[in-house]
Image: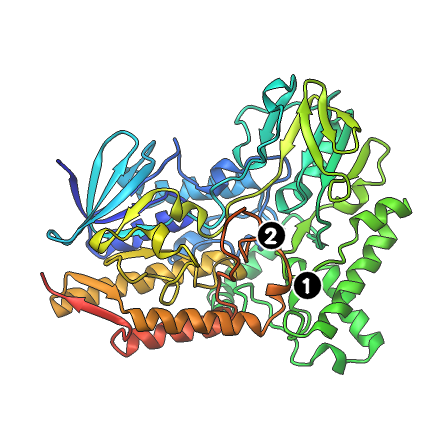
Amino acid sequence: MTALQFDVVVVGAGFAGLRALHTLRTRGRSVAVLEAGDGIGGVWRWNRYPGARCDIESYDYSYSFSPELEQEWRWTQRYATQPEILAYIEHVADRFDLRRDIHLNRRVVSAQWDDDAGRWIATTTRGEHWSGRHLIWAVGNLSTTKRPELPGRETFRGRVLHTAEWPRDPVDVAGQRVGVIGTGSSGMQSVPILAEDALHLTVFQRTPNFSVPAMHQEITHEQDVAVKTDYAARRQRILASPSGLGFRPRKEATVEVPEDRRNEIFEEAWNGAGFGFGLAFRDLLIDEEANALAADFIRSKIAAIVEDPDVREKLTPRDHPFGAKRPVVDNGYFATFNRPNVTLVDIRSDPIAELRPEGLALSSGEVHHLDVLVFATGFDAITGSLLRPEIVGRNGLTLRKAWSSSPETYLGLGTHGFPNMFAVAGPGSPGLLINVLVGIELHVDWLADLFEDMDARGATRVEVEPQAQRDWTRHLLRRAEQTLYPKARSYYMGDDVPGKPRVFMLYTGGLRDYRDVISKCAADGYPGYSFRKD
């Protein structure tokens, strides 16, 4: 078997893959980035659905490694749209000459550890073999899509779309009867846009979701100058925050603040904080009474927006704490249901039975006639893209077997039995609970330092020690149990994929604490990792 040889093979050409390529190449390593798609950008290439935009402010959802890049790129909106984010990624690739080491249309189907050679061999759908001393998975937490297997789908005469696999060509729904299944982020973002053009829009909802208004706005010249003048300090505030958003929770507990003032704080957050609403107080995700006050405030907002009392009740979330499922930042979602051409269908009480040529049939026998059906059904999150290929470590151990009960890592970076293999912003890290761009940069820089430490030792192999992995896994579960996250069915818990172990998969201690943990690990000589020379 002939394999192309590199120091590092990186899988995925989204934000994480490009940052790994730039950093490791700058430090003198040969890198090959293997990308399944026909272009770079990762999730921001595929999620082209109407209304797609980031829920983190543009200035913060960006790379921090280059002050020159920070100054020259001009964001136009507080929350960047998908086309603007993709344009930024394309600009970064061109500015730093990254494309020459990115290999498109190379979906990795397997990765095998060669213990004799001390190298990973990644095999693509083309039958090519790529060999790396190190293997880095930069495949993202939300990149393997889920599609419901609906009986009769092949008979449906209309068009079927998925928000995460949206066509490049414009989709014209004018005069069309459109159905949307799912009320997570992509559903709640796309519904207001689709409703403007569709003849009729039917939203099929299983679980009502909390959402807060984004308060989108154009960035003025004065605002841009102010941010760029203070950018370095802004980045430091982000690194010192628990969320990576720059928001600091109030020091008071929610119940310590008088009701009038508490509601004023909630109102201020509702009208400007966006995703930071969950940080209005320090205890919203750890104290049920505090969370209930925040949830009641949002429910009062829904009640004030939605006119029809029956629709209002169906849209009001009551079965999980606010924030225990990732809350959505939307642009007019609840008000959309006041439109005469929009219908809400509760598929928890009347589940979907099948697709028919004319549309979607419910268990009750009711049929909704459709021309276009949109799956806004999300992803096999966090572990889905890591378990999709066949990854085989030492002694034939597969990652699927190693993670059959739960994804176990040390520091969210490596797993015992898989030397020289790492995941960026994956399970066991803060991942999606923080600004993921900050988590990506933290991981990539930490790995680059680890590889240099290996060179200084003369080591060619590094592997997580089993006890360190067990200790970190227990620590993760203890921290999660101190929060309200396990009280919701969510992709954080693996609840949304049949047969997936129900276990909280991320570190809930926040960015600041996590940064301290991995920085200390590096400063202390990487305890929990064993090093070996060939």
Judge whether 197 appears above or below 112 on screen: above
| Residue 429 seen from this side | yes
Q: Residue at x 76, y 31 (%)?
A: 201
SS label for mark 2 = loop
Q: Secondary structure at mark 1?
A: helix
Residue 212 coordinates in the image, percent (x, y): 71, 55
Residue count near mark 1 (Cα–Cα under 10 Å), binned few <14, some 14–19, many ≥20: many
Cα–Cα span, label 1 and label 2:
12 Å
User: Can you tell which mark lies on residue 108?
Assistant: none
Instruction: List x then y, in percent, for residue 250.
Output: 66, 76
Q: How is this picture coloured?
A: rainbow
Picture quadrant of residue 375 = top right
The kind of residue on which mark 2 rests is Asp
Quadrant in which the N terminus is drawn: top left
> Considering depth in this image, is 270 or 402 the residue closer to the camera?
402
Any part of residue 240 in sight: no
Quick one: label 1 or label 2, which is nearer the N terminus?
2
Q: Which residue is mark 1?
A: 277
- In the picture, the disc for residue 55 is 2
Q: Nearer the viewer, residue 481 or 107?
A: 481
| Residue type highlighted by circle 1 | Phe
Q: Residues within 10 Å of mark 2 (few under 14, many from 20)?
A: many
